Every structure is written in C-alpha cells, then in structure tokens.
Image: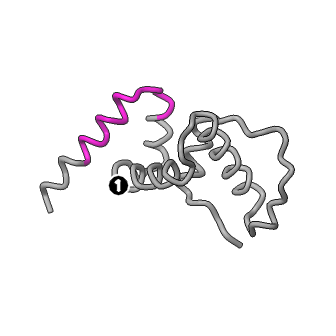
Amino acid sequence: MNHIDVWVRLTVEYLKLNTPNDISLKSNKYHLERKDFNTTLTLTNACVEFNLSPLLTNMGIWYYILYFIADSKRLQLLFESKSVEKLENEMNLMKGFSEFK
C-alpha cells in the first residue's frame, strides 16, 4: 500500500482545505489508503482551483517543512497563526543555522 508523505498530509489537515464532494474515483485503483487518497484529492483540487501545479506544490510542501520546520506541533502553530511573515521568519531562522555546519 502506498502512502502520502506525512508533511503533506499534516499540511492539508492543518490548512483545513475543502475535500471535493463528488469523489467518483476509487482509492484502491491507486493503491492508497482512503485517508491518503482523500488528502491527495483535496490538495489537487485546491491546486487546480488556484491554478497551481499539484506536483510542484507537493514538492514545495515537503521541502519547506522537512528543511525549515520538521516538527508537527511547530507546523500546526505556524499554520494557526495564518501569517506568511511567520513562515518566512521560520525559514530565515533555519537558514541561519546552516552557517554552523
């Protein structure tokens, strides 16, 4: 069984994106658990709505959270703040640690 990345799943959950009502596709066709299939549809639907690439959005979510947050509670707090500035500050803070390699 395939799974969606944990960071992508949490992002979709914390952003409280709307799941499409007319889910006519069957999740087992794609070998995904139902929860992961719904997450995939929800993210893809939001991307299409805003004219974004679902693939690039998925990659961006994964990269940003893995390298700049990497903590589910911190991620939740940042999304609850609804502040792009706080997300940018988090990225700048973590970039500062790269100097200590």
What percent of the width, then of the height, locates residue 15?
58, 36
For the N terminus, which image quadrant?
bottom right
Check the image and name the residue furthest to the front.
51
**Position of 67 relative to 16 (above/below):** below
For the C terminus, which image quadrant?
bottom left
Q: Nearer the viewer, residue 15 or 42?
A: 42
Task: Tell me where residue 16 sits by quadrant.
Answer: top right
Q: Main secondary structure of the magenta part?
A: helix
Residue beneath the point at 50% across and 39% down: 76
Is 81 on the left or on the right of 37, as rendered? left
Residue beneath the point at 73% across and 56% down: 37
Residue beneath the point at 64% across and 65% down: 3
**Position of 17 relative to 99 (above/below):** above
For label 1, the crowd category at 10 Å Cα-Cα, with few meaning under 14, some 14 to 19 and many 20 or more, is few
Please provide the residue range marked out in magenta.
Answer: 79-94
Check the image and name the residue furthest to the bottom.
1
Residue 88 within the magenta-colored segment of the rendering:
yes
> Number of labelled discs?
1
Q: Nearer the viewer, residue 45 or 95?
A: 45
Residue highlighted by disc 1: 67
What percent of the width, then of the height, locates residue 14?
58, 39
Residue beneath the point at 29% across and 35% down: 89
Q: Nearer the viewer, residue 88 or 26?
A: 26
What percent of the width, then of the height, locates residue 94?
26, 47
**Secondary structure at numbered mark 1:** helix
The amino acid sitting under disc 1 is Tyr
Residue 101 within the magenta-colored segment of the rendering:
no
What percent of the width, then of the height, locates residue 11?
55, 44
